[in-house]
Image (cartoon, helix red, strand yellow):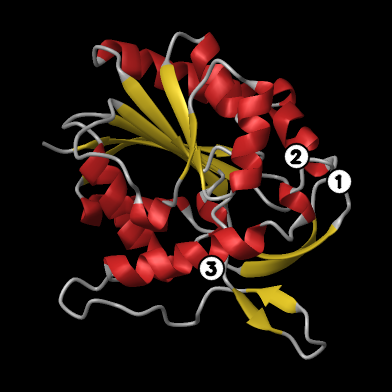
Amino acid sequence: MTAPLPATAAEDGAERWSWPISPPRDDAAGVMRPAEARAVADLGVRNLRRLQYHDPSAPGWRVIARLLAEAPYLRAALALFADLVHAAGGGPVADVGCGPGHVTAHLHELGVDAFGIDLSSVMIDVARRDHPRLRFEVGSMTDLNLADASAVGLLAFWSLIHVPDEAVPTVFGHFRRVLRPGGPLLLGFHVGDESRLKTQDYGGHPMNVHVHRRQPDQVAAWLRDAGFTVEAQMLIDPDESVPGAVLFARRQS
């Protein structure tokens, strides 16, 4: 359920994971240019296959797929999102950064015409294997290959955590572009004020991926700048060391 990161050479010759400190920007718009965003995405696709986190033989992704069963507030957020999609008349819903497809499948059980997109072809293979009746495609949220106004709803559930601050405006611009006017958006992310290097996956296997924690108010500000109306936000496990947040927004006309 991630957007992977390009690698840089480490001292030992192995590759470590990090985004460029200052991604190339379009000076006028303040966002990465499309060609450069695609280059970042291409680097991620090649290097992501080295991560145990995205290895279908490793147990880490199975842990991710079980998380919803132990998360009643997240299930409630997804149920509300499904209600909003139905109230909008129904139609295609993009699960961007779908990972092994467990959230996509959960939405489908709620009657949503959901399909999944993930930068990792390995994760897409896992999702297709485990949910053969659903649609899954390889794609990047920094260069989202969906037609304008083609989705009734869109969610990114803990997939933005691997996207650096510099790339978030580009991502939210794509989200607005592909959503129909008034379409609902659901985001889930870690709450905090720092970025950390994650060295183990959920199964205890070694990995090197940066995880970005953000304050809900900052995410909401980025959304408003991108042309969204923020409707609700909820803090989850506020007493834990790493709280989570879900945020509901809607594309402005």
Return the residue nearer the eye: 98 or 39.
39
Q: Is mark 3 on a helix, strand or loop?
A: helix
Q: Position of residue 232 (x, y in %)?
A: 37, 34
In this rendering, would 80 be left or right of 32?
right
Of marks 3 and 1, the one in the foreground: 3
User: Is residue 1 visible from the viewing direction of this image?
Assistant: no
Residue kind at label 3, given as amino acid type: Leu
Of marks 3 and 2, the one in the foreground: 3
Residue topped by disc 3: 43
Evaluate if marks 3 and 1 touch, with contact meaning CB atoms under 8 Å apart.
no
Which callout, 3 or 1, points at the residue further toward the start of the chain?
Answer: 3
Q: What element carries label 1?
A: loop
Q: Position of residue 83 (x, y in %)?
A: 38, 13
The dot on residue 203 is 1
C-alpha distance separating marks 1 and 2: 8 Å
Mark 1 is surrounded, within 10 Å at the Cα level, by few (under 14), some (14 to 19) or many (20 or more) other residues, namely some
Above or below: residue 217 compared with residue 40: above
Q: In which quarter of the image is residue 113?
A: top left
The dot on residue 61 is 2
